[in-house]
Image (tube, rainbow, N blue to C red):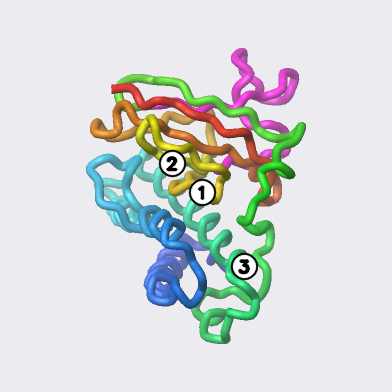
Amino acid sequence: MGIYPDKIAERTVYYSKVMPYLNINNVRLLIAAAVLAALNKLYDNVSTDISQMGYVQLIALYDDESTSTKPVKDERRKRDKALQHALSSIYDDIPKSIWNSNDRAVLGRKGPVVGHKSSVISTEKSIGTNAPVGDLSPSGANSLTLRVNQTTGQKGVSRKSEGKQKNIREYMFHYSVLAANAPTPINPNACTEHIVITRLPHKMNFTPDQAGMRCSGYVQNIEKPAKAGAISKLITGIIPG
């Protein structure tokens, strides 16, 4: 077993231990405020929209047979994966000299996270011929659809050339929602939100008060087996009202 337990119930217990620990020790562990805020939102976010709920809210619905619908199961799985990626990035960014025995005991980190590279990303080195090519387009009121182009001729390619590239396990979308005239994030680390995309195209729902704002971000390949890969150029879309 790796850092993250294999069973859902055990992972839920793991998250319940590490989240308060990271919040208490964030200064000592050099966790940036924006990164911690994004992590906390993934874990605990009250909303009437399941696509905006945190893991805490989704696991409660998931564990109740009367509310454990397919959409709830899908969202729980997305949030679960996003939490693991976010935690791995945080662990990778903590300098080795800072880790103590208690950190390792609570977080389960014995050494480098298998399958994850440091989240300190150089976009110049990451953008290459195998980088994903993403697009954000309007898809109804308060919604954008994220698409990633796929090379024709690959297995599973659609008529619109949409879908995951060969050997790509999933995508991580790093993004921020800002005023239309605000500066765009200069790289994935400057983004405040992070979601895991397992199926394409992916519809992103926003709140009515975000209409007219700009969603800007970077699509990152997560290769098989679970290896952080190349990153797209910045993509942007205006959230329709």
As for residue 241 lying within the magenta part, the answer is: no
Label 1, residues with CA under 10 Å away: few <14, some 14-19, many ≥20: some
Q: Residue at x 42, y 75 (%)?
A: 21
Q: CA distance from mark 1 to mark 2?
A: 8 Å
Q: Is residue 113 visible?
A: yes
Quadrant for the N terminus, please.
bottom right
The amino acid beneath tag 1 is Ala
Quadrant of residue 40 in the image?
Answer: bottom left
Q: Which residue is mark 2?
A: 176
Which three-letter amino acid code belongs to the residue tagged 3? Answer: Gly
Residue drawn 43% across the image and 76% down it: 25
Residue at 29%, 51% in the rendered image:
61
Mark 3 residue crowding within 10 angstroms, few (<14) / some (14–19) / many (20+):
few
Q: Position of residue 227 (x, y in %)?
A: 68, 51
Mark 3, residue position: 2
Q: Residue furthest bottom?
A: 101
Q: Is residue 147 magenta?
A: yes
Q: Is residue 236 left or right of residue 157?
A: left
Give the vertical position of 222 relative to 111 (above or below): above
Which span of residues is magenta-colored? 144-172
- The C terminus lies in which quarter of the figure? top left
The image quadrant of residue 93 is bottom right
- Considering only order in the chain, which callout, 3 or 1, is on the residue closer to the N terminus? 3
